Image: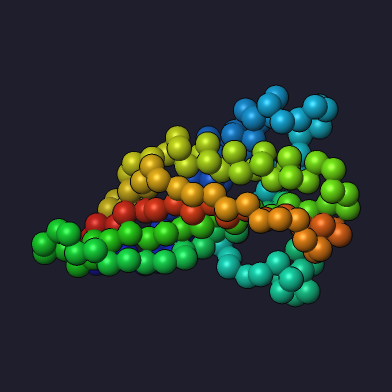
């Protein structure tokens, strides 16, 4: 059987939500970023690719949040007799919001580094036939209006190789 797109996205979501995932990485990075004892709130990980403006109007979205979704699927039939062989680009989009500009970008960097840490620690086989590659890229967006007055977003794209017979 071939893979499902949902299966790939859920595999990345599980990495981020696992015990050694985002909560552990956030805690480990706390000393590097936070000058006070209060740990920034945990960012829930959801499977979704909906613009912030639409989510805020529809559900009153709370921040921070990490959205995980498949951005691109590339078939690269490198192995004979495989039903599918290729790459799936999965994006973890992090959004932080606040009523003040002070510290907003610093909080975004904190979450970006935590997601990067999880991805770097889990390179290799994540499920049968799914392999998280070492490559990823980060795009940091400028602050704009939204959320609790100000909103800033980062997108971390990673690649999952899929080989299914």
Left or right placement of residue 128 versus residue 8 in this view:
left
- Rendered location of residue 144, percent (x, y): 77, 61
Residue at horizontal 78%, vertical 54%? 97
Q: Nearer the viewer, residue 111 or 19?
A: 111
Q: Which quarter shows the C terminus?
A: bottom left
Depth order, front residue of 1/47: 47
Give the residue drawn at x 45%, y 37%. Answer: 120
Q: Position of residue 59 (x, y in %)?
A: 75, 70
Quarter of the image for the N terminus: give it: bottom left
Which residue lies most toward the left here?
A: 80
Near-viewer residue (36 or 61):
36
**Residue 113: x %, y % from top left:** 59, 38
- List the single residue furthest toward the top: 31
Residue 135 lies left or right of residue 84; in this view the side is right
Residue 102 in view: yes
Residue 37, given in percent of the width and then of the height, sits at 81, 27
């Amino acid at each position: 059987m071939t893979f499902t797109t949902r299966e790939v996205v859920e595999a990345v979501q599980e990495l981020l939500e696992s015990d050694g995932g985002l909560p552990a990485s956030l805690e480990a990075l706390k000393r590097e970023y936070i000058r006070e004892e209060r740990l920034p709130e945990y960012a829930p990980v959801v499977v979704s690719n909906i613009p912030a403006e639409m989510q805020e109007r529809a559900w009153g979205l709370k921040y921070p949040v990490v959205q995980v979704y498949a951005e691109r699927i590339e078939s690269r039939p490198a192995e004979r007799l495989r039903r599918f062989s290729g790459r799936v680009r999965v994006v973890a989009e992090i959004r932080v919001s606040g009523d003040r500009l002070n510290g907003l970008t610093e909080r975004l960097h904190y979450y970006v580094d935590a997601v990067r840490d999880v991805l770097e620690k889990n390179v290799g086989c994540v499920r049968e036939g799914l392999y998280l590659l070492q490559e990823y890229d980060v795009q940091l967006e400028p602050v704009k209006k939204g959320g609790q007055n100000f909103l800033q977003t980062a997108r971390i794209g990673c690649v999952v190789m899929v080989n299914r017979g």
